[in-house]
Image: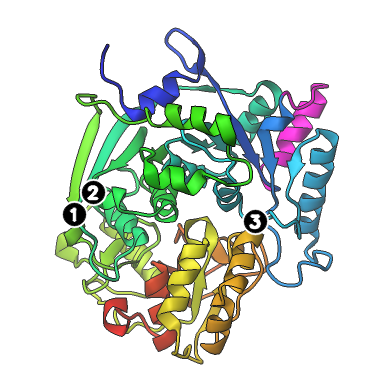
């Protein structure tokens, strides 16, 4: 039998039918939905006189538009309120499990799925959200889909999908002190660029990846889309199994034993072929920071923005335009640059480990008065844990205030917007023009680098501060 990659094993097991010269009819185990991309799909379904085919395979939670303060009150913004109300009505009509606002399981869809045990190895998962690749950390094939595809999954529990090519990214060695999974993924994106993995599904491997916790692996897979990949995944191992076991919707008893036996086979066979391979040394990675308007424009924190001679002449006009938007110059160092806002949260870095990392870094210190810091847990479960572990108390003593769960300042679809011209060090996943608010200037970084900026009021190297 020909050796198979992890991706091939999961993909091939879910192909219902292959269309000659076209896409596959691909079965979806779990469909995750939120308030932004589902309304049109539900409307389309209703226009056809249909209902959701397998509602038990669908999980809903509002996250993008919800406020992160006073969630017990009526949502003030009319559009946001309407979208959340529409999600509630559609879920009731179609018998879909909904973790609504103030539900103990509410939160960002890509935080909620894993922490509740809905996400499991070998699954296929889709959501009308590009960062669905997060769930690939479990050895699942997970990817974002468009509104018409959401409707297709509602109607059939399948999707028409061409099979992507396969890429292997290996990172070996040990990460330096102060270097996190966020730095690892920003480093890889900076190496490959925002289009370097277009058309591929990426498997991350190597000793540095295996050493990561599950939440750190989710951070890495989450940002696969930022280099153009269809998704990213990591082979499940004991770290995965220990994380999943005992969670609310994970298999129990005999079902767990059977599932575990199956999951242990989910790894790339020796000799399996990839269409493209890259290898990096963990020791080459330092804390990373973006300086431009896409996630590929990143440098090590001790480095400099490229100078004119380092840029392809054909890309120079666009490069200069990006720097002009950010208020930076060719060859600038970022260390010491003023910071106005710090955001720790999102489906990239809003999990309990991220808040632990932040609290550990700022304990006994004080936030700079010039910095506005938004600390936003990824879910009600994370919020509850942070309170119980005393993390909120540590943050408050350092001058921080934790808000309520939601996508928050990751994107300008709610009240948490960075004002025009202000600089934000953000643990989210995108730094596009206007992503955090019209005219906002975003530098992507890890929770440690964000903590350093919050304490000093300027871009600082967390290795020196902590």
* Residue bearing mark 2: 207
Q: Which mark identifies residue 36? A: none
User: Which image quadrant for residue 152?
Assistant: top right
Q: Return the x and y of residue 302 as percentages of the image width and height.
A: 22, 74
Q: At 26% from the left edge and 70% from the top edge, which residue is drawn?
A: 177
Tell me whether the residue at label 3 lies in contact with that at label 2, contact meaning CB atoms closer than 8 angstroms: no
Tell me whether the residue at label 2 lies in contact with that at label 1, contact meaning CB atoms closer than 8 angstroms: yes
Instruction: Residue at the far front: name it.
Output: 253
- Residue 180 vs residue 302, the one in the foreground: 180
**Mark 1 against mark 3, which lies toward the viewer?**
1
Does the image show residue 435?
no
Q: At 81% from the left edge and 39% from the top edge, which residue is drawn?
A: 90
* 256 up-or-down from 461: above or below: above
Q: Give the range drawn in magenta.
A: 36-53
Q: Dot 3: what SS? A: loop
Does the image show residue 127?
yes
Split into 4 quadrants, where in the image is the N terminus? Answer: top left
Q: Distance between the residues labelled 3 and 2?
A: 32 Å
Q: Dot 2: what SS? A: helix
Q: At 57% from the left edge and 85% from the top edge, which residue is drawn?
A: 396
- Find out whether residue 199 is within the magenta segment: no
Q: Return the x and y of residue 88 as percentages of the image width and height.
A: 81, 46
Count of all numbered marks drawn on residues in the image? 3
Q: Which mark identifies residue 107? A: 3
Decide: few, some or many residues near mark 3? Use Cα within 10 Å; few <14, some 14-19, many ≥20: many
Q: Counting residues from the N terminus, which is met first, the one under dot 2 or under dot 1?
A: 1
């Amino acid at each position: 039998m020909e050796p198979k990659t992890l991706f091939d094993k999961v993909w091939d097991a879910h192909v219902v039918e292959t269309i000659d010269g076209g896409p596959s009819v691909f079965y979806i185990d779990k469909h995750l939905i939120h308030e932004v991309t589902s309304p049109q799909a539900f409307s389309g379904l209703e226009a056809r006189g249909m209902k959701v085919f397998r509602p038990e395979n669908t999980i809903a939670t509002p996250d993008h538009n919800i406020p992160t303060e006073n969630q017990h009150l009526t949502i003030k913004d009319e559009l946001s309120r309407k979208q959340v109300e529409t999600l509630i009505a559609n879920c009731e009509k179609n018998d879909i499990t909904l973790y609504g606002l103030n539900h103990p399981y509410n939160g960002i869809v890509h935080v909620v799925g894993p922490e509740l045990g809905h996400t499991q190895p070998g699954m296929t998962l889709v959501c009308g959200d590009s960062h669905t690749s997060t769930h690939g950390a479990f050895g699942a094939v997970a990817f974002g889909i468009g509104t018409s595809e959401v409707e297709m999954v509602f109607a059939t529990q399948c999707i028409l999908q061409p099979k992507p090519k396969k890429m292997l990214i290996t990172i070996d060695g040990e990460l330096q002190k102060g270097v996190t999974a966020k730095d690892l993924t920003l480093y890889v994106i900076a190496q490959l660029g925002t289009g370097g993995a277009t058309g591929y599904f990426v498997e991350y491997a190597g000793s540095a990846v295996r050493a990561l916790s599950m939440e750190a692996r989710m951070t890495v897979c989450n940002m696969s889309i930022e280099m153009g990949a269809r998704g990213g995944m990591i082979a499940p191992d004991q770290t995965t199994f220990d994380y999943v076991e005992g969670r609310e919707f994970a298999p129990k008893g005999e079902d767990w034993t059977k599932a575990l036996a199956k999951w242990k086979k989910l790894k790339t066979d020796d000799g399996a072929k990839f269409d493209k391979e890259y290898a990096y040394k963990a020791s080459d990675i330092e804390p990373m920071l973006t300086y431009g308007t896409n996630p590929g424009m990143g440098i090590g924190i001790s480095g400099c923005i490229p100078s004119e001679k380092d840029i392809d002449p054909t890309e120079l006009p666009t490069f200069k335009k990006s720097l002009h938007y950010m208020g930076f110059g060719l060859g600038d160092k970022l260390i010491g640059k003023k910071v106005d806002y710090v955001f720790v949260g999102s489906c990239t870095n809003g999990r309990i480990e991220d808040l632990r990392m932040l609290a550990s870094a700022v304990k006994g210190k004080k936030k700079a008065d010039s910095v506005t810091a938004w600390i936003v847990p990824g879910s009600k479960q994370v919020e509850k844990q942070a309170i119980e572990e005393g993390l909120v108390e540590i943050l408050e003593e350092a001058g921080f205030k934790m808000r309520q769960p939601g996508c928050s300042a990751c994107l300008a679809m709610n009240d948490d917007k960075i004002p025009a011209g202000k600089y934000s060090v953000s643990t989210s996943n995108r730094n596009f023009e206007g992503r955090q608010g019209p005219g906002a200037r975003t530098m992507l970084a890890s929770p440690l680098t964000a903590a350093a900026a919050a304490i000093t009021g300027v871009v600082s190297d967390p290795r020196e501060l902590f």
